[in-house]
Amino acid sequence: MPDVPRQGGYGPRTDADWSSRGEYQHPAAGWGAALSVGKVLAKQRELGRGTRSMFVMNHPDGFDCPGCAWPDDTKLTLDFCENGVKHVTWEMTPKRVMREFFATHSVTELAGWTDFDLENQGRLTEPMAYDPATDHYVPISWDAAFGMVGAELRALHSPDEAAFYTSGRLSNEATFLYQLLAREFGTNNLPDCSNMCHEASGRALTASIGSGKGTADLDDWEQADALFVLGVNAASNAPRMLTALADATRRGAKVVHINPMLEVAGTKTIVPHEIGDMARFHSTATSELNLQVRPGGDLALMRGMAKAVLEAAERDPAVLAHDFLADHTAWFAECRDLVMATSWTELAQQSGLSELDIRAAADIYLQADRTIIAWCLGVTQHEHGVDTAREITNLLLLRGNIGRPGAGPSPVRGHSNVQGNRTCGIDHRPKETFLQALDDEYGITSPRHHGLDTVKTIKAMHAGTVKVFVGMGGNFVLAAPDTKYTALGLAQCELTVQVSTKLNRSHLTHGRKALILPCLGRTEKDQQAAGKQGVTVEDAMSMVHISFGKRRPASADLKSEPAIIAGIATATLPNSSTPWQWYVEDYDRIRDSMSRVLPGFDDFNELIKRPGGFRIPQPARERVFLTPTGRAEFSLAALPNVIPAQSDTLVLQTMRSHDQWNTTVYSADDRYRGIKNLRELVFMNEADMASRGVSEGDFVDIESTSRDGSIRRVRRYRAVRHALPKGSAAGYMPEMNALIGIADYSTQSDQPLMKNVLVRISRSGD
């Protein structure tokens, strides 16, 4: 495959005036976050309305932040964070993309713009269709747009020639209608962003405890004696978690951060809503211990901690939860034998930590009566992500840390409703019980065969077996691996449809026919025939709550996501008995149907009237394990070798900068890593730089070899020294996605290996 050019529109151009200030010395959040928020509000000309929005964000009578999925803390007057304000203000911008903009700029021209500049044009205002004769998007009416989608879908030889993608921004109500559209049409091709982030967590927890969700909630976090946080950069990815971490250390709980990169969230913080601490510049520690594990070495660390626990049990049998193990688990004896047979030498080598480090973490676990282990993409985006998440559960099971207060597994989901998407039916491998309930409610026959996930959808577009792609939110081409390959796949489609709030790269890598359908943002009023509507979301801890937009829509020609889905469905399924337009008049009607289909949603419309919403029942939380044995099942996975075979190979992990949310880049700065005006960089260990003759700021070329044998390169990236384990490196997505081939995905979860890219780095030629 040809080299990917440096200036392909992946982010702001950042050759000059860059700087690396070294390790960030200040607390996470605090005045740095406050100043950043002020700058964002001023830059977007939203000082007044933006400030008012903070007081209703994440509150029962307000709107849910469209950013991360961290639970709302209803006890706080101000429950927001720096990144949430950026995300909301970016949506509330007064800038507008009108038809005149598209008339002035061709798609070819726009393809040369940076992604920052594309999104910075502002909110989309009306439906647009691609005109191949002029290479411009031109206005189209909603009815004509829906008619185009319906005609293309009905013309397919098989429903499986269409794919219906969603990002985590879609509400529960829209999600339910979207999956219903796909299944009534006749396909389970429902790829989603979970396929790229927490698919491994869902599969692991389903295998271990019979449910794909964590069991801990925010109250449990407030009661835990120990919190282990793996593969999470909380200060950037879930900043409101800092409140929980600070509260934990103040009440004497022990917090352990485990991550190849030492992140500022693992040191200290000043939580902005704690006015006294802000005024006194008083910071709170957020950790007892930081362990810089080798990328992919988390499984070895968890097994090492389990080995230390089992050794302690030989001296004091009370260390183990014997009654729990006997009554509620399967395969404990086999797991014990496997763990004890693993040598400390191997555990230390594979984790990248010393035996003393592993034992220090185990001591904290042993001293705690109640423990929560949380993890994010640093665990899941590896070949052995499923096994690692199961190993986490193994460790929790040893001491009965599931199904009681202050304990449990707690995956940290990313986008605000990504967990709700899966709950409400966005699943390419749906369960029979769900499909039967859906069929009973609507009198349809849903397809039973598995559909396509994200990676398989991209491959199918290339093969010509997926001809229509509908994207509900997100920026698919930049979020997916192998940016160029994904773009070429979209270009081979007969029709691509993108439901969006802003212009992005996926609008410019389109099919032969293409539509941009603009939708309401979560901050905006959704007025339908029955009055103002609210939509629900599910957070990372299974709490469901309602969200009401407060602002006037950016354009009178915007439609809500449920209205867009209903419009497509009406045009596609002319003989459908589903009351699509009746649903749009009043979302209570959608929720009534959901209450009859989804477990735990009984009396849905009444439940969401509770302040803060309601928690979906989680059987494993009550120690009811819906596994084949009816018990929580220990994993017996082999310890993987995560050390590259070639000595010149580094393991690179892709990640977001602090001034970024998913594929949206707000600036080329990364405050918490000391970076100014630079994204085309690679963080390296100082010894690895020296062995390659690379100095700070040198240009380097980065090369990877895909599992399909293709060589992939990015050129002239700046090398930046960082405190990383020897043998590892890191860089930003989506710029680094070019190094990840379409064949580079986990055989356990089918997730792209975005934290496990094997690369060779060398100084660039002149």
Image: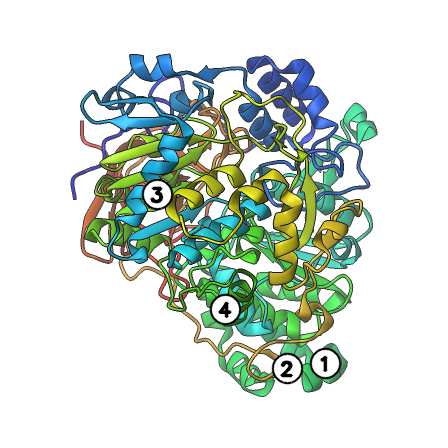
- The residues tagged by marks 2 and 1 sit, at their Cα atoms, a distance apart of 7 Å
In three-dimensional space, the C-alpha distance between marks 4 and 1, rounded to whole angstroms, equals 29 Å
Circle number at residue 164: none
Q: Are marks 1 and 3 in contact (CB under 8 Å)?
A: no
Residue carrying label 4: 431
Q: Amino acid at mark 3?
A: Gly
Residue assigned mark 1? 324
User: If you read the primary sequence from the N terminus, does the residue marked by circle 3 or circle 4 appear first?
Assistant: 3
Graded by Cα atoms within 10 Å as few (under 14), some (14 to 19) or many (20 or more), the crowding at tag 1 reads some
Q: Which mark is in front, 3 or 2?
A: 3
Determine whether, in the image, residue 400 is placed left or right of residue 430. Answer: right
- Residue 575 vertical position relative to residue 22 in the rendered view, above or below: below
CB atoms at circles 3 and 4 under 8 Å apart? Answer: no
Mark 4 surroundings: few (<14), some (14-19) or many (≥20) residues within 10 A: few
Residue located beneath label 3 in the image: 150
Residue drawn at point x = 73 percent, y = 79 percent: 321
Q: Residue 237, located in which quarter of the rendered image?
A: top right
- The circle drawn on residue 329 is 2
Disc 3 versus disc 4: nearer the observer: 3
Residue 149 vertical position relative to residue 421 in the rendered view, above or below:
above
State left or right for residue 501 relative to residue 463.
right
User: What residue is shown at x 57% (from left), y 85% (from top)?
Assistant: 331
Few, some or many residues within 10 Å of mark 3 (<14, 14–19, 20+) = some
Question: Which residue does the image show at 59% across and 75% down from the upper left?
Answer: 307
First in sequence, mark 3 or 2: give its number: 3
Residue 581 picture location, percent across and down: 53, 42
Question: How far apart are labels 3 and 4 at the CA level?
Answer: 28 Å
The quadrant of the rendering that contains the C terminus is top left
Label located before the other in sequence (2 or 1): 1
Q: Amino acid at mark 4?
A: Lys
Circle 4 sits in a helix, a strand or a loop, which is it?
loop
